[in-house]
Amino acid sequence: MDISVGVPKPAGMFDRDREWSMLVKFAADEQPGATLGVVSGRRRQGKSFLLESLCQELGGFYFSAQEATDAESLAAIGAALTRHLDPVVPFAPASWSTVVDVLLRIGRDRPVPVVIDEFPYLARSNPALPSIIQGAYAPRRMERTESRARLLLCGSAMSFMGGLLSGNAPLRGRASLDLPVDTLDYRLAARFWGLTDPRLALLVHAVVGGTPAYRTEMIRYDAPRVLDDFDDWVIRAILSPGSPMFLEARYLLAEEPDLRDSALYHSVLGAIAEGNSGRGGIAGYVGRKSNELSHPLTVLEDAGLITREIDAFRGNRTDFRIREPLLTFYHAMMRPFWPQLMRANATDRIWQRAKHRFIGNVVGPHFERICRDWTLHFAEDRFGDWPVQVTAGTVNDPANRTTHEVDVVAVGHADAGRPPLLAIGEVKWGETMGTGHLDRLRRIRDLVNRNDKYDTSQMRLVCFSGSGFSEDLVRLSGQGEVDLVGLDDLYA
C-alpha cells in the first residue's frame, strides 16, 4: 500500500507530486530503525514549504537553522525542541551529539519526520556535525535501532549538499533518501505563470526560468497579460531597482559558500552568456589560461549554475551552458548597463537599445535549450525511441573547409553495436525556416553518414522554429522528408 495516498498534498502547492509522495513514503515508513534523508535544491524552489507541510501533516519536528555561531545554533535548536517536547525542564544542550540523540528519541513510539533545514549553516559553524550524525547512526547503536525518527537534512548550498553523500563523506551510505527539488520545467512553468500563449511563455521562461518564488514572493503574481505587455513587464518586474528581482542574479552567487572569488565567477558566467561555450573561449574572455579555469568551472557546475555537455560528434570538446536563465539575462542584458539601470531614469530606452542582445544572446540560445529539452523528455513518439542523450554537436566539412554547428543531436540507447542517431535538428527563433535550412541538414546528414560512430539508418531531419515554416518546407514535411517542430508542439 502506498502510504502517500492517505496524506493529501497541502492546498496551494503547485505540482511537486513526485517529491511529496517520496517524502511521505520516507517519513511514514513503519520499518524499525531511524533513517536519514537529504533534500537539496537551490533557494526559492519550495523545499521549506514541502518540509514544513510534511511535519504539520505527520506531527513532526521542523527546525530552520540560521547563520550563527555554533553556540547560538545549539541554543536555538534547544529552544525549538523545548517548545516541541514541552519537557519539565527546558532543554539546553551542550553538544550536537546530545541534540541528535534527542531528535532520534522523538521517533521512539512511531515514525515521525524530523527536519533540519538550512543544514549547511550548522555544518559551516561546526564541520564535525556530519561525522557526529554518522556516529549517531551506527548500525547497532540502540538509539538508532529503537527509533523510527526520519531525519531529513535540507540545504540550498548545492556544492555542499552534493558532497554530503559522495566519495569519502561521513554520511555516504547512511541515507535512504536523496531528493533534489529542481526548478519547474518549461511546460510546468507556463502553467504556473498562467501563460497560454507559447511565444509569451517561452519569452518569460527565458528571463526567469522555472523558479516558483519568482512569481509568488518576489514578483507578487505580476505576469505579462499578453505579448504586447512583455516589454513593460520586463522593465517593471526585472529591470527596476525597486523590484526584488533586480539583484537576484547577484544573490544567486552570493548564496554559494564555495564561490569565494565572485568577480572571477561573474566573468566566467559573462563569457558563457556572450556565447563563449568552449573552455578556450571562456579563458580568452576572462583573461586566464584554460588550465586555470578547471576549478571555477567545477565549482559553478557543483552549484548547479552551469552544466557541461560533450559535443555529440567530437568527444574531446566540451561546451558549458548556464542552467539558470536569470543569470544569462543578467549577464547579457543588465551587467553591461548596470550604472544606468541603477539610476532608473532611462530603463525603457536601455531596454529598447539592448533588445537585439535579448534576442541574440538570451532568447536564441534559450530556445535551442528548450528544443533539446523537448527532444529528450517529450518526443519519444516522434523519433521512434527514447533518446538517452540530446546535446549539440560540431561536424567537420573538409570539402568546404568549414564546420557545421548542429543545434539538436538525439542519440538513442545502444542495445548492441553502435548507438542509433535518432535525429539531427536546426533551431531558429526569429526567422521562417525554408528549404535552405533543410539543404544544410541534408549536407550534415551526408557528412555524418561517412562516420562510423553512430547507426544513422533511422535518423530524422528536424527543423525547430519559433517563427514558422515556408510552404515548400511544409510540403516536404508532408512527404516525410523532414519533421517540423513549432512552439505549439513544444508546449502541447
Image (cartoon, grey):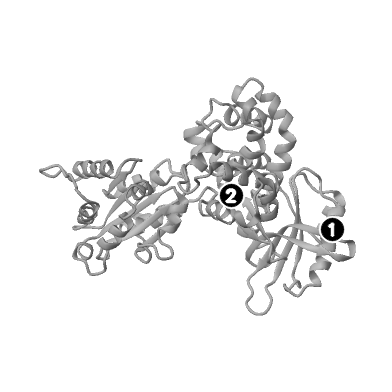
Identify the residue at horizontal 66%, vertical 34% (top origin). Answer: 336
- In the rendered structure, the answer to whether residue 271 lies left or right of residue 183 reads right
Residue 53 locus on image (x, y percent): 35, 45
Q: Amino acid at mark 1?
A: Arg
Dot 2 falls on a residue whose secondary structure is: loop
Quarter that holds the N terminus: bottom left
Tell me whether the residue at label 2 lies in contact with that at label 1, contact meaning CB atoms closer than 8 angstroms: no
Dot 1 falls on a residue whose secondary structure is: helix
Q: Which residue is mark 2?
A: 323
Identify the disc placed on residue 440.
Answer: 1
Q: Residues within 10 Å of mark 1 (few under 14, many from 20)?
A: few
Seen in the picture, residue 124 relative to 147 is either above or below; the reply is above
The single residue placed furthest to the top in the displayed view is 345
Q: CA distance from mark 2 to mark 1?
A: 29 Å
Is residue 190 visible to us here?
Answer: no
Of tags 2 and 1, the one toward the viewer is 2
Q: Amino acid at mark 2?
A: Arg
Residue 331 locus on image (x, y percent): 63, 39
Q: Residues within 10 Å of mark 2 (few under 14, many from 20)?
A: some
Identify the residue at horizontal 62%, vertical 57% (top origin). Answer: 291
The single residue placed furthest to the left in the displayed view is 88
- In the rendered structure, the answer to whether residue 435 lies left or right of residue 430 reads right
Query: Which of 269 and 414 lies nearest the eye of the viewer?
Result: 269
